[in-house]
Amino acid sequence: MKKNKALEKIQQRCQALYEDLNLATVRAWKAEAPGRKAIGFMPVYIPREILHAAGILPVGLMGADIEIIRGDAYFQSYICHIPRSTIEMAVNGSLDALDGVIFPSICDVIRNLSGMWKMMFPDKYSKYLDLPQNFTPGLAGEYYIAELRTLAADMERLSGHRITDDALRESIRLYNRNRELVLELYDLRAEKPWQVRTVELYLLLRAGNLLPVEEHNAMLEAYREAIEGEERQALDNSRIVLTGAFCEQPPLGLIHTIERSGCYIVDDDFVLGSRFLTAPIPEEGDPVANIAQTFLDHAMETPFVYIAEKEKGEALVRQCRRRRGEGVIFSAASFCDPALLDQPMVSAAVEREGIPYTEFKYAENTGQFQVIKEQTGTFSDSIKLWGNE
Ligand code: SF4
């Protein structure tokens, strides 16, 4: 088969960015112009538009599969792994390129991590971003707009750049385009999962954690073009929706393993912040109010977002129908409270609809995949044999 040079180049770049744990890419970006700032953010979602409009590089932090030497000393045994690797990287200097970190309010672990960061790095910026959990029009909007204006003022102070409405509208336009490109690839994968491999799509999303949005948009467009020139063989795999992996990410080998075991992942919640808003932010009018309102009206339904009147699991059932998913894999980080507290309710909803499911837990440093391969492979086979009965 003819080599697809363009695709190979993108794959290599994505892999290098995935392995860039010391943030050399961020250092290089900062070195290009004096005074540049970079702010890290923990999963899942922050309004990156506000940072971008101040000329600041938002850097997505997702832990890592690294040896933990000091990170364990900061946490009790029975919690997930991502805060340990984050602390490890903070104390070993891997995150030195960052001028601060934003911790969105998704669980107690992230809240505690924000306190630790504050104590360990008193000279760096630290913000616990309290995303609204009350979606009542007016009340939540007012609160969140005020929170976003505080963040914007912080970013202005840090960068020395005023955030004009026009600059913020331009940032919104760029991130709207970014979400649109990501969603187009998700749609294409659901249509032709043999063409857009999940490992490739995942690495593309991870690249967006480090690259400026302009560069990431160009990369997503180039991938789309390169993949269209590629001939890949369709396999008789089962179509799976994977859920639960919205914060701590599984190791890359585990995603490979699921794909190779006979599952086409046709939807997932990896790197969820990249598409957490399900509609574009309006590009006209008050940009801060628009960011807030889009969050209130179009935040994705996930375990860390409060759902008042609807039934837990409805969104996943809809997602399965829309993506023609034949089964669900619940794949959550060990000890992930938001994911695991929801799972009984969500799996009951899936079961009521007659959608088969299986579940396992992982940690970002899980090293053995054989058992999971057997489990997901058997799950895929069982769908092929009995899925439609
Ligand atoms: S993996 Fe789950 S429990 Fe751990 S920090 Fe993320 S959301 Fe919180």
Image (cartoon, grey):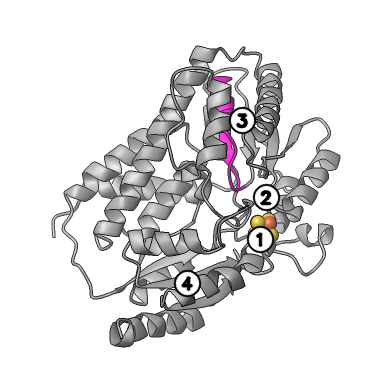
Q: On the picture, is 60 further left or further right than 151?
A: left
Sequence order check, earlier mark of 4 and 3 = 3
The yes-or-no answer for disc 2 within 8 Å of ligand 1 is yes
Mark 1: secondary structure: helix
Question: Is residue 24 inside the magenta stretch?
Answer: no
- Amino acid type at mark 1: Pro
- Quarter holding residue 226: top left
- Quarter holding residue 122: top right
Q: On the picture, is 264 further left or further right than 247?
A: left
Q: Are marks 4 and 2 in contact (CB under 8 Å)?
A: no
Task: Judge depth for marks 4 and 3 and give the one in front.
Answer: 4
Q: Are marks 2 and 1 in contact (CB under 8 Å)?
A: yes
Q: Which mark is residue 338?
A: 1
Confirm whether residue 366 shows in the render: no
Q: CA distance from mark 3 to mark 1?
A: 29 Å
Magenta range is: 43-61
Please rate how many residues cluster around mark 2, counting C-alpha atoms within 10 Å: few if below 14, some from 14 to 19, many from 20: many
Front residue (pair 78, 177): 177
Sequence order check, earlier mark of 2 and 1 = 2
Q: Are marks 1 and 4 in contact (CB under 8 Å)?
A: no
Image spot of residue 347 (x, y percent): 53, 73
Identify which residue is drawn at 50% across, 16% down.
Answer: 167
Confirm whether residue 61 shows in the render: yes
Asked if 206 appears above or below 313 in the picture, the reply is above
The yes-or-no answer for disc 1 within 8 Å of ligand 1 is yes
